[in-house]
Image (cartoon, rainbow, N blue to C red):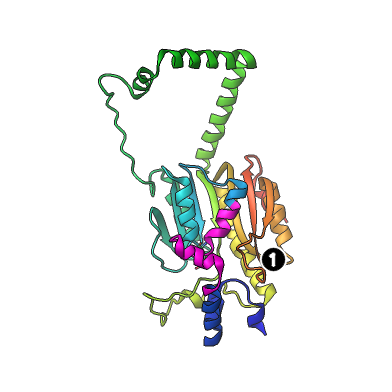
């Protein structure tokens, strides 16, 4: 009975009979998104959920810092890495060991543990950690700076047109000083964010029970993460309550590390407490959406909150009050 209600996570099957495991494999084989993920070299079909939400909400930009909570096996990190390149950095955290996708840094540990949260916070504060190295030359070429070289390569007409457009823009708006003030304000928000350790652009959380590992892992382990986790049980309220704990940990982390204007996306299992979570999100973000991507199985109770543009002012007490 429970197995029929079980939600999406394929690892649910691990606790069931071997015939349910066969059913999962058969379902994966005939699943369009699972096949497409294999063809595209993505680590799982979950990639399509993030791709769909990113198409709709434009979460990523090159150069950003993304934290991917519950990254394994890694398809969301693959998407985040490709969408934040060049210059971005993606840090994945997961309870289970998994091969990090190309370009992604990972930390293994239970994100419900304050020590792991502190480690991730410390990691992201170092701006160069986990960022692909780029080689810049500080030497001007032929005695000219890069900018001067670009100007030399432009024709006279181009330069005239550019000067004209810049002048026209300023004259039209008549807000030369206003523009400066806006830039100043933007700078100080950035400064304040940095002072508070808010350096992450996007926090993702797809945390739920881990997927069944097929190789390279000895199951008879005293610290077997499978037996310590909020495993999806098929009991709707328990799954919901466990997922709320994971969402709360993710949101608290986002409160501490997300820069003003940054985005938050988290998976949850629908139930009576998700309204309270939504209220907290609405206090901290300018816009909050509930999403059920096409690629999320319809029989699953999973859904996603997409929270856009973190506000600067709300305090911890305001956001997390009952
Ligand atoms: C659905 S999978 C994530 C799939 C991933 N988004 C992808 O695209 O490949 C959920 C992951 O959350 C991880 N997880 C669950 N609870 C966790 C916790 N407390 N700390 C860290 N990771 C956790 C699991 O180990 C599992 O790998």
- Find out whether residue 34 is within the magenta segment: yes
Of residues 68 and 190, which is closer to you in this image?
68
From the top left corner, tell me how far across and down residue 225 is, in percent.
47, 74
From the top left corner, tell me how far across and down residue 150 is, in percent.
37, 22
Is residue 43 visible to us here? no
Question: Would you identify the image quadrant in which residue 58 lies?
Answer: top right
Magenta: main secondary structure: helix
Residue that appears at 52% across and 83% down:
22
Q: Which residue is mark 1?
A: 270
Q: Magenta segment, which residues?
A: 29-53
Residue that appears at 53% across and 30% down:
187
Residue at the extreme left of the image, as rendered: 142
Residue that appears at 50% across and 39% down:
194
- Find out whether residue 158 is within the magenta segment: no
Quadrant in which the N terminus is drawn: bottom right
Is residue 193 visible to us here? yes
Residue that appears at 47% across and 46% down:
84
Of residues 212 and 155, which is closer to you in this image?
155
Q: Residues within 10 Å of mark 1 (few under 14, many from 20)?
A: many
From the top left corner, tell me how far across and down residue 34 is, in percent.
52, 67
Of residues 267 and 160, which is closer to you in this image?
160
Left or right: where 217 falls relative to 307: left
Above-or-below relation of 153 to 136: above
């Amino acid at each position: 009975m429970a197995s029929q209600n079980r939600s999406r996570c394929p690892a649910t099957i691990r606790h069931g009979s071997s015939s349910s495991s066969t059913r999962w494999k058969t379902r994966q084989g005939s699943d369009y998104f699972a096949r497409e993920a294999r063809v595209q070299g993505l680590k799982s079909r979950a990639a399509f959920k993030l791709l769909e939400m990113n198409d709709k909400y434009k979460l990523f930009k090159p150069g950003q810092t993304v934290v991917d909570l519950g990254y394994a096996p890694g398809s969301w990190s693959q998407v985040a890495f490709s969408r934040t390149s060049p210059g971005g950095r993606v840090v994945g955290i997961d309870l289970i060991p998994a091969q990090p996708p190309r370009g992604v840094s990972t930390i293994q540990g239970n994100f419900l543990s304050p020590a792991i949260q502190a480690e991730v916070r410390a990691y992201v504060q170092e701006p160069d950690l986990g960022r692909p190295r780029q080689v810049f030359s500080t030497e001007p070429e032929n005695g000219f700076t890069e900018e001067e070289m670009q100007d030399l390569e432009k024709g006279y007409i181009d330069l005239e047109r550019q000067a004209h457009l810049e002048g026209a823009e300023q004259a039209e708006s008549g807000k030369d000083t206003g523009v400066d003030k806006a830039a100043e304000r933007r700078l100080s928000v950035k400064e304040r964010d940095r002072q508070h350790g808010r350096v992450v652009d996007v926090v993702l959380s797809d945390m739920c029970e881990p997927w069944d590992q097929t190789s390279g892992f000895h199951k008879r382990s005293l610290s077997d993460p499978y037996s310590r986790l909020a495993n999806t049980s098929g009991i709707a309220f328990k799954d919901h309550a466990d997922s709320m704990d994971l969402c709360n940990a993710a949101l608290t982390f986002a409160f501490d590390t997300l820069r003003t204007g940054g985005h938050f996306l988290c998976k949850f299992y629908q139930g009576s407490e998700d309204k309270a979570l939504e209220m907290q999100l609405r206090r901290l973000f300018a816009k909050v959406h509930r999403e059920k991507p096409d690629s999320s199985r319809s029989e699953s109770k999973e859904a996603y909150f997409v929270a856009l543009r973190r506000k600067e002012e709300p305090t911890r007490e305001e956001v997390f009050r009952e």
